[in-house]
């Protein structure tokens, strides 16, 4: 994400494009991301609210899992465009997860 932001800012000549990621990634690699991307914003995805302890909750337990699939940007977009709360977003994630995992 940081590399894409950097390339987009160079190609489009628009500096300061934000990179939106999860707080997990920021806690792990903030200095590296900020050096490349500059404008970095974190989204706190509340995985601790999940009904799925062995799966989704692992994201919030001690940094065991980090993601790199656009979860931060997606959560930010959903929250801003729909007005859903953290709990409502996690309920939707849980519903989808439940349909895929027995």
Image (spheres, helix red, strand yellow):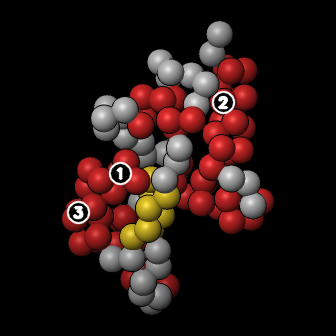
Mark toward the start of the polypeptide (3 vs 2): 3
Q: Which quadrant, please, contains the N terminus?
A: bottom left
Q: Which quadrant, please, contains the C terminus?
A: top right
Vertical relation: 91 (above or below) 52: below
Label 3 crowd bin: few (<14), some (14–19), many (20+), radius 10 Å: few
Q: Nearer the viewer, mark 2 or mark 1?
A: 2
Vertical relation: 68 (above or below) 84: above
Report which quarter residue 21 is drawn in: bottom left
Helix, strand or loop at mark 1? helix
Residue situated furthest right in the rendering: 82
- Residue at mark 2: 94
35 or 54: nearer the viewer: 54
Q: Distance between the residues labelled 3 and 2?
A: 31 Å
Q: Kindly identify the residue that appears in the image at 42 percent across and 87 percent down.
A: 15
Mark toward the start of the polypeptide (2 vs 1): 1
Q: Kindly identify the residue that appears in the image at 73 percent across and 54 percent down.
A: 84
- Residue at mark 3: 32
Residue 17, position as x, y percentages in the image: 47, 79
Residue 13, position as x, y percentages in the image: 45, 89
Q: Kindly identify the residue that appears in the image at 48 percent across and 64 percent down.
A: 20
Residue 58, position as x, y percentages in the image: 42, 28
Q: Distance between the residues labelled 2 and 1?
A: 21 Å
| Residue 11 visible | no
Mark toward the start of the polypeptide (1 vs 3): 1
Helix, strand or loop at mark 3? helix
Helix, strand or loop at mark 2? helix
Q: In this view, does 65 lie to the left or right of 47?
A: left
Residue 25, disc: 1
């Amino acid at each position: 994400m940081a590399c894409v932001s950097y390339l987009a800012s160079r190609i489009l000549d628009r500096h300061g494009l934000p990179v939106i990621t999860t707080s997990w990634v920021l806690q792990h690699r903030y200095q590296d991301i900020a050096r490349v991307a500059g404008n970095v914003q974190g989204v706190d995805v509340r995985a601790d609210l999940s009904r799925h302890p062995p799966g989704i909750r692992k994201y919030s337990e001690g940094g065991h899992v980090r993601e790199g699939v656009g979860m931060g940007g997606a959560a930010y977009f959903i929250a801003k465009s729909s007005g859903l709360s953290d709990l409502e977003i996690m309920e939707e994630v849980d519903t989808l997860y439940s349909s895929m995992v027995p």
